[in-house]
């Protein structure tokens, strides 16, 4: 049996994931880090809104971290973060409205975790790198490609670590699928097409806030204006404004488009053609639905990758990515129930892979009855369906954060450093222009280079 890349054997994959739930089921049992220990990493949390809280709920499961400061322009968010840290550590961290004040005041910090709105990612990351801190920053890197470039330059000039939050790159299921099943076992044959989607329901896509917004959440106008927001609606719904974000294609699509080139062994697309519109949310600055096609040239041949993001319907199974090859298709998602492998009729049998535990065969679906409207001569035989092995019980972002702090300790390399993240994200910045201009954009070095 050949050696699997990156030590991700079937056995190690199953071993790593089998016990994950035991720790995660009782995070309160983790002992708070000793702030005086030389092995403790001192961390500041920058941005404690919804995503900041998601990340903290992962961070609290990682031993050896001491949360020293919380920075957020919202009193509500900042106090929420400080209280959650106090509940974990038994002491309340310092709270700051302004990042410059925090960087000038706090001593002994090792790293920051940034979960602010997209248009603040680049300024905050650059400031922290220049201050000598390691940075974990949520994706997208920035709302502009030049902002993303500045982050790469700052990381490489400072010599500090900068991990971008494309968390699928640290997900054991994704890494096993890419390294073992696709690259080593080559079960897909030649990948020719990729399909992916994130379809979000209308109910989950509504504006946040409005007249019923609690007074305790309100941020004073002078504070909002100082930090780039016109009003509370912009503050609560920044993802829908063109000056503050890239819209759904970057907010949701970037997670999955990142996987395209990664699974194709870091191939870069040669072109994009996109279409978008405001089918329902007529007053929003960004499209409420976008569809795009990326062209790739790989050593194995051409690949076309289709992606859609919808905010008006959840039909089609929510979010997933599908890698379609001549011998099999792998459908994968952060949700295990949405993941499966389909062997093409006529492709080599996988009995040996099933026997050794690489794959698990699913029961064959019932054969449909003959129908008068069926055109049998045009039909393909139904593919055989298999499961991906093992489970994954950790919160989705936790392995990526674990990888970051292991790298800070010198025990690992980053799974998604700033330069690799930029190479993945650069094509995404051209999707909205393609849709707005209704034209195909053929990529040049100027489009994609740092």
Image: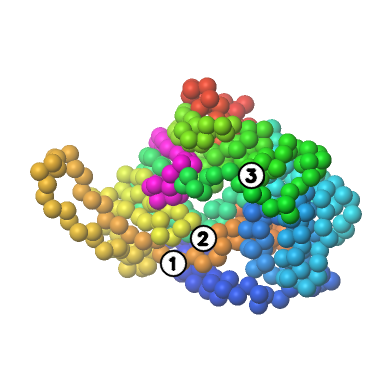
Q: Quadrant of residue 245?
A: top right
Label 3 Cα crowd, 10 Å radius (few <14 / some 14-19 / many 20+): few
Q: Is residue 412 left or right of residue 301?
A: right
Q: Residue placed at 54% from the left, 38% from the top?
A: 249
Q: Residues within 10 Å of mark 1 (few under 14, many from 20)?
A: many
Instruction: Please state the extent of the stretch shown in magenta in the rendering.
Output: 296-323
The disc, 1 or 2, on the residue closer to the chain's N-terminal end is: 2
Q: How many marks?
A: 3
The picture places residue 374, in percent across and down from the top left corner, at: 14, 42
Contact, mark 1 vs mark 2 (Cβ under 8 Å): yes
Cα–Cα span, label 3 and label 1:
44 Å
Magenta stretch holds residue 302: yes
From mark 3 to mark 2, how far is it between C-alphas?
40 Å
Q: Which residue is most to the front?
A: 211
Image disc number at residue 210: 3
Residue in the picture at 50% in, 32% down: 278
As drawn, the label of residue 172 is 2
């Amino acid at each position: 049996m050949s050696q699997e890349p990156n030590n991700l054997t079937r056995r190690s994959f199953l071993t790593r994931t089998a016990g994950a739930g035991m720790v995660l089921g009782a995070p309160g049992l983790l002992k708070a880090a000793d702030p005086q220990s030389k092995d403790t990493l001192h961390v500041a949390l920058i941005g404690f809104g919804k995503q900041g809280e998601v990340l903290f709920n992962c961070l609290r499961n990682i031993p050896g971290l001491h949360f020293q400061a919380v920075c957020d322009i919202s009193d509500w968010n900042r106090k929420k973060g400080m209280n959650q840290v106090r509940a974990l550590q038994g002491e309340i961290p310092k709270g700051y409205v302004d990042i410059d004040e925090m960087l000038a005041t706090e001593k002994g910090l090792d790293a920051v975790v940034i979960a602010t709105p997209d248009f603040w990612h680049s300024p905050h990351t650059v400031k922290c790198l220049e201050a000598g801190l390691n940075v974990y920053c949520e994706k997208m890197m920035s709302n502009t490609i030049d902002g993303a470039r500045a982050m790469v330059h700052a990381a490489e000039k400072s010599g500090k670590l900068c991990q971008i939050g494309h968390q699928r790159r640290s997900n054991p299921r994704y890494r096993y699928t890419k390294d073992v099943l696709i690259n080593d076992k080559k079960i897909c044959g030649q990948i020719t097409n990729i399909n992916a989607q994130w379809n979000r329901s209308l109910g989950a896509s509504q504006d946040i806030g409005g007249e019923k917004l609690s007074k305790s959440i309100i941020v004073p106008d002078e504070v909002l204006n100082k930090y780039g927001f016109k009003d509370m609606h912009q503050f609560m719904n920044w993802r829908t404004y063109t000056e503050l974000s890239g819209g759904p294609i970057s907010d949701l699509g970037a997670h999955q488009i990142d996987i395209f080139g990664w699974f194709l062994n870091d191939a870069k697309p040669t072109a994009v053609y996109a279409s978008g519109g405001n089918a329902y949310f007529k007053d929003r600055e960004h499209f409420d639905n976008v569809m795009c096609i990326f062209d790739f040239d790989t050593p194995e041949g051409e690949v076309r990758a289709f992606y859609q993001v919808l905010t008006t319907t959840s039909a089609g199974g929510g979010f997933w990515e599908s890698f379609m090859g001549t011998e099999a298709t792998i459908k994968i998602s952060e949700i295990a129930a949405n993941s499966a492998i389909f062997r093409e009729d006529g492709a080599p049998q996988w009995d040996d892979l099933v026997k050794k535990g690489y794959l698990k065969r699913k029961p064959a679906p019932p054969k449909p009855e003959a129908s008068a409207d069926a055109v049998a001569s045009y039909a393909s035989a139904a593919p055989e369906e298999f499961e991906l092995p093992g489970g994954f019980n950790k919160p989705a972002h936790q392995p990526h954060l674990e990888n970051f702090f292991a790298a800070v300790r010198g025990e690992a390399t980053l799974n998604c450093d700033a330069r690799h993240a930029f190479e993945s994200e650069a094509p995404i910045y051209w999707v909205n222009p393609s849709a707005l201009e209704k034209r195909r954009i053929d990529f040049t070095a100027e489009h994609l280079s740092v």
